[in-house]
Amino acid sequence: MTQPIPQSIKRLDDGAIEIVWSDAARCAYKPRLLRNSCPCANCREQRVQPPATPQLLTILKPEELAPLAITAMQPVGQYAYSIEFSDGHSSGIYTLEYLRELCGE
């Protein structure tokens, strides 16, 4: 069976990205899901690190004060998308296969 491919991609009113796949699946990807699932080497490494001991007073970075948003999404060849987030992160390459896996989350 061939890998499903996007038939349409659009931004929803809540900031999510909706992809309609060739196998008729319709998936909405919230910015936080995509950012937390970033496949770049740095993000993958951070996800396997043990959690830091919590501080009594959490200090937020400026980018954490505003809601996370997807600011750009560009195709990478015919196999993936590069997604840029409002926190400045843009190094993840989301393959079509990976995006399809994230559909059920």
Image: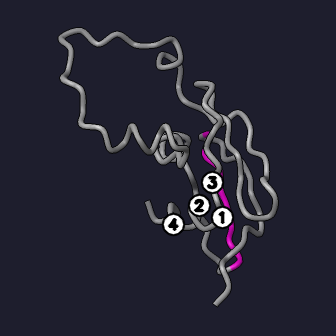
Q: Could you say where residue 4 lies in the image, as x and y percent from the top left?
A: 67, 77
Work out how far the residue at label 1 is from the one at label 4, CA to CA, in angstroms.
9 Å
The residue pinned by badge 2 equals 99
* Foreground tag (4 vs 3): 3
Tell me the number on the disc at residue 101: 4
Q: Which of 26/56 is in front?
A: 56
Q: Could you say where residue 72 lies in the image, as x and y percent from the top left?
A: 74, 38
Q: Circle 1 — which element?
A: helix
Work out how far the residue at label 4 is from the one at label 3, CA to CA, in angstroms.
11 Å
Please name the residue shown 63% across and 25% down the image: 88
Tag 3: amino acid: Tyr
Q: Closer to the N terminus: mark 1 or mark 4?
A: 1
Please name the residue shown 24% across and 33% down the image: 51
Tell me the number on the disc at residue 96: 1
Please name the residue shown 47% across and 20% down the image: 64
Q: Would you say residue 21 sits in the magenta stretch?
A: yes
Q: Which of 61/15 is in front?
A: 61
Q: Are marks 2 and 4 in contact (CB under 8 Å)?
A: yes
